[in-house]
Amino acid sequence: MANEGPLYLGFDLSTQQLKAIVIASDLSVVSDSKVDFDGDFGSKYGIKKGVQVNEAEGEVFAPVAMWLEALDLVLSRLQEKDTPLNRIRGISGSCQQHGSVYWSRDAETLLSGLQPDKALVDQLTGALSHPYAPNWQDHSTQAECDQYDTQLETAERLAQVTGSSAHHRFTGTQIMRLRRKLPEMYTATSRISLVSSFLASLFLGSVAPMDISDVCGMNLWDIPGKNWSEPLLELTAGKDGVCELRNKLGEVRQDGGGSMGLISSYFIVKYGFSPKCGIAPFTGDNPATILALPLRPLDAIVSLGTSTTFLMITPVYKPDPSYHFFNHPTTPGQYMFMLCYKNGGLAREKVRDVLPKPEGPDPWATFNQHALSTLPLDVKSTGDPAKLGLYFYLPEIVPNIRAGTWRYTCDSVNGSSLTEASAPWPAETDARVIIESQALSMRLRSQKLVQGPGAAVAGELPAQPRRIYLVGGGSLNPAISQVIGDVLGGIEGVYKLDVGGNACALGGAYKAVWAFERAGGETFDELIGKRWKEDGAIRKVGDGYKEGVFEKYGNVLGAFGQLEERTLEVARNT
Ligand SMILES: Nc1ncnc2c1ncn2[C@@H]1O[C@H](COP(=O)(O)OP(=O)(O)O)[C@@H](O)[C@H]1O
Ligand SMILES: O=C(CO)[C@@H](O)[C@H](O)COP(=O)(O)O
């Protein structure tokens, strides 16, 4: 560990964990720690996989007190590792998107008067007007979504304005529902934070503004207009409630860098932070993931966390109801394209858990063995049908469809004869088919983004991303990496970040370096690009494009789209 020079701290407050990573100005990792909500808190908060569920209403939420306790714990773990917290010059972070925290009228007083001899959780429960934060897996807001989609006349128009059509988890629809369900709580709320601005607020000792990228996950922010959308505020809070809601949401910070203020004395006294340590804007976990490396247009990131997300950056704002556009977290004029699947890591775990438990320590060994020994689409010889499936153990986001499992076959050469399988195929085959089908969905929806320039870069090769970067817990899995590369291609191959499971925390830490060390108008890419060394940061884990294999998946892409359409149609009519 270098003995001098400033250090930077990045957090990731995601569904199942709170992670912290400390880096130096040269981007080398100095220390890290983590809290696993289920593992560390057991049954104390009544959670499973980081959340509580009210099935009857489709509600999914997290106890905010648990996050407060986790913050003290993750910092004490850094301390136990002798991390020189006194050298930390700046803090930023990444947090699960869309969740909202409701502050009471006592929030500012309690946040600014924190006593270091007590725990956060014992001092801040009174700062909350609601003990829970809706989680991104919540699907209780269909009625609100229907109203959002028509408020600006069409879902297309809503996507033009806010970057997305209406989504259950988006904060605007969540606020609208909670205002109706818990009117007294809403009235007692002085401010509403996103999870990112909530965590930043704890460090600042005052409610922090929302961030310019994370705010795009609310269905309330007018991206081209750079302001809250008046008609959408009106829909959420009623004609007379617009001003009140605007005050609760506060100003949005347009600059992703710089300092929002100095660290609260609580952390100085309790953990030994320097009084000069500054707090940069925190952002969403997906925006932070694209900051974990100098990403170029045409590169794609697949984040294999609890959710699975597919991310690209682009200078062109081309929203569509079937995906999301966000402001880039650091660079005005750049945008982030995102697909988010609810049935990601947990759905793969369900398929894994049907298979016999492996003898050794790797719980994925049997799943991986079958995923790799099954041929693409399970086509063993000419004439065999291709196998496609939808494995939605939870109601899905992409497409918006109820929970269920659907298995289909089609002609492997041209995708014709799409037919529902009359009986489930062997569970072993599901291991490959679930990964293939998740990747086919990403390929189907990102086709337009890789079209023209992809072909130009690749010469004669078909359009596809240049590089695929894998991050998140699932990126540790070699079978998943290989199958994703088979389907999505990747002209330069498939890469894994060496801190694969820590990528968003790392993105948060890089953001802090840029926020405090940028010179003049130096962009994130300029600063990080100069310091980032490919060696030691990423590892090639797959070839990506394989001639013949990539095309096999191309042959059934249309059929996969039809399968989704057909399933949607049946679901609509039942
Ligand atoms: N070796 C592995 N193979 C496949 N999936 C894995 C592996 N290790 C972890 N995971 C998955 O990673 C998920 C957690 O990823 P992580 O990025 O830490 O999640 P989050 O940020 O949502 O809390 C788990 O749900 C688990 O399914
Ligand atoms: O809802 C989304 C993105 O729109 C999710 O990606 C959340 O941001 C949570 O992510 P993880 O806990 O899976 O990291």
Image (spheres, rainbow, N blue to C red):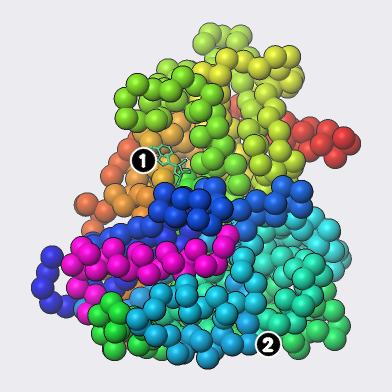
Query: Assess mark 1: CB under 8 A from ligand 1?
Result: yes
Q: Please state the horizontal and vertical placement of residue 320, each as a whole percent of the image.
A: 70, 57
| Mark identifier at residue 309 | none
The residue segment tinted magenta is 62-86
Q: Please state the horizontal and vertical placement of residue 396, each as a whole percent of the image.
A: 67, 44
Where does the N terminus fall, quadrant-wise? bottom left
- Quadrant of the image occupied by residue 4: bottom left
Count of number-bearing discs: 2
| Mark identifier at residue 476 | 1
Q: Could you tell me the amino acid type at mark 2? A: Asn
Rendered view: 187 above or below 368: below
State the residue position of label 2: 247
* Residue 63 counted in the magenta span: yes
Q: Please state the horizontal and vertical placement of residue 483, each as a whole percent of the image.
A: 45, 31
Q: Which of 441 and 308 is in front in this view?
A: 308
Q: Quadrant of ligand 2?
A: bottom right
User: Which residue sits at x=67%, y=74%?
Assistant: 221
Examine the residues drawn in magenta and state their main secondary structure: helix
Query: Assess mark 2: CB under 8 A from ligand 2?
Result: no
- Quadrant of the image occupied by residue 411: top right
> Circle 2 — which element?
helix
Q: Please state the horizontal and vertical placement of residue 301, each as a whole percent of the image.
A: 45, 50
